[in-house]
Amino acid sequence: MKTQILYIEDNEQNQYLVRYLLEAEGYAVTLAADGSEGIKLATEAPPDLILLDIQLPGMDGYQVARILKKIPSLATIPIVAVTSYAMVGDRERALASGCDGYIEKPVDPDNFVAQIERYLPVHLRKTD
Ligand code: MN
């Protein structure tokens, strides 16, 4: 069974790049273009990890993280914010909203998989 990663992101270039990088290492990736879709997909089929853009149409990523963490069946799934909000305080705000980690855009193709794997249990990681 492949490790399942849900990526909630509205930008097609980021969707494409992240899916490509993760699938190349053997991960299964599901995409959601906004928070509502992401919450729906996570509820229907809980993933092993959620990657979350902050700047999303409709509710922002902070709201999405808060909602996901309140759903008992999803509360233990790690959420990593992937965001270009590289301003002082954004990391703290992401963590305060329930995110377990924070990765800054632009996505670094050489390090991205290693960065997200820090938030996965060892037995679910595909590289080391
Ligand atoms: Mn966005």
Image: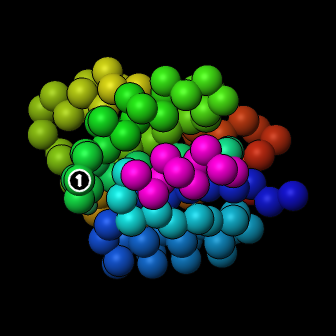
In magenta, the rendered stretch is: 36-45
The residue located at (20%, 34%) in the rendering is 90
Residue 17 image point, x, y percent: 44, 75
Question: For the N terminus, which image quadrant?
Answer: bottom right
The residue located at (49%, 47%) in the rendering is 39
Tell me: 24 left or right of 40.
right
Q: Quadrant of residue 71?
A: top right
Q: In which quarter of the image is residue 102?
A: top left
Tell me: 75 left or right of 67.
right
Residue 7 image point, x, y percent: 49, 58
Residue at the far right: name it: 1
Circle 1 residue: 58
Question: Which one is nearer the viewer's eye here, 77 or 89?
Answer: 77
Residue at the far left: name it: 87
What's the amino acid at mark 1?
Gly
Tell me: 123 left or right of 65.
right
Give the image quadrant in which the ligand numbered 1 is located: bottom left
Residue 69 seen: yes
Q: Does the residue labelled 1 lie within 8 Å of ligand 1?
A: no
Question: Which one is nearer the viewer's eye here, 36 or 55?
Answer: 36
The residue located at (54%, 72%) in the rendering is 19
Residue 98 image point, x, y percent: 41, 26
The residue located at (12%, 32%) in the rendering is 88
Question: Label 1's element?
Answer: loop
Q: In this view, does 45 lie above or below 20?
A: above
